[in-house]
Amino acid sequence: METLGSLLQHNLLQESFRDAWTRLLESSAKFHVVTWGTLLLYLSSYYLASLPGFIYQFIPAMKKYKIQQDKPETWEDQWKCFKMTFYHIFTLHIPLSLAVYFYVEYANLPCDWNSMPRWYSAILQIFGCFLIQDAWEYFMHRLMHHKTLYPYLHKVHHDFQAPFSIQATYAGQAEILIFGAGFSFGTFIFCHHLFSLWLWVVARIVQNTHVHSGYDVPWDPLRLVPFAATSRFHDFHHMNFHGNYAAIFTWWDELFGTDKEYENYNARGRQKEMKEHDN
Ligand SMILES: [Zn+2]
Ligand SMILES: [Zn+2]
């Protein structure tokens, strides 16, 4: 049973969100709200979601959570990634934000408050998007590791053996567009409102920067979610180059046995720990 206090709080929260949303829509022409809103949302989410992983390197107590202890992030590598993400703004993200506007316009995607999905259906829609993205990414990623395609499509992303969060989108444009197709499939199927589309943008960025953070922290909520790919899971792909091709859920790798090397690696780690404990 909801108490009166929580009900009032809920209503207050909803009302302030409704006011903010309506003000945003009325603040400028639809073109500006959708195009620049999408771009700003993308960029702020990307850099904000990368921030924890970036800050960890300056905190000595966080060192023990770094997954590949022997490969700390360097300024040179991070600067290299930052420059590439900056370059992508002009070559990818501005054109893609324009594409979002044209999609919203021509698919007649509702933007108004009244047709906004309820929070629980928005969560379900994002979950559906993740399912599609994950399956698409698993098979495309495996394909990109084929020796004839790898040098042209995926080599850049493997420049660093130990990932760090700002490195999440350090990749060639073709790779970003191919993986991005999975993003659009989810959007077309599940996101029937501008809010869902924007929520999907944020969720995808947070998930992608998280698995590239290079840190496995004990408070990671994904540790409690069955079949969720953690930062440790994707880190292994960068370290080992083979296996763990999915980066959202682990089931495709389990089904096709592409997580075997990871399982063996973990088993060896546990054995080593037990031996050290016994001595
Ligand atoms: Zn790869
Ligand atoms: Zn990666």
Image: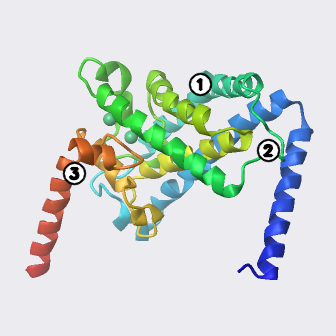
- Residue pictured at 80% horizontal, 74% vertical: 7
Q: Position of residue 231 (x, y in %)?
A: 39, 54
Q: Is mark 3 on a helix, strand or loop?
A: helix
Give the image location of residue 256, x and y in percent.
Answer: 23, 41
The Cα atoms of the two marked residues, 3 and 2, are separated by 45 Å
**Which of the two labelled residues, at mark 1 and mark 3, occupies the earlier sequence position?**
1
Q: Mark 3 points at which residue?
A: 262
Ligand 1, what quadrant? Answer: top left
Crowding at dot 2, Cα within 10 Å, few <14 / some 14-19 / many 20+, comes out as few
Of the two numbered discs 1 and 2 in the rendering, the one whose residue sits closer to the viewer: 2
Q: What element carries label 2?
A: loop
Nearer-N-terminus badge (1/2):
1
Q: Mark 1 points at which residue?
A: 92
From the viewer's perspective, is residue 1 above or below residue 113? Answer: below
Left or right of 119 in this view: 228: left
Q: Which residue lies furthest to the front in this view?
A: 1
Residue 3 in view, yes or no: yes
Residue in the image at 69% along x and 56% along y:
119
Residue type pointed to by label 2: Ser
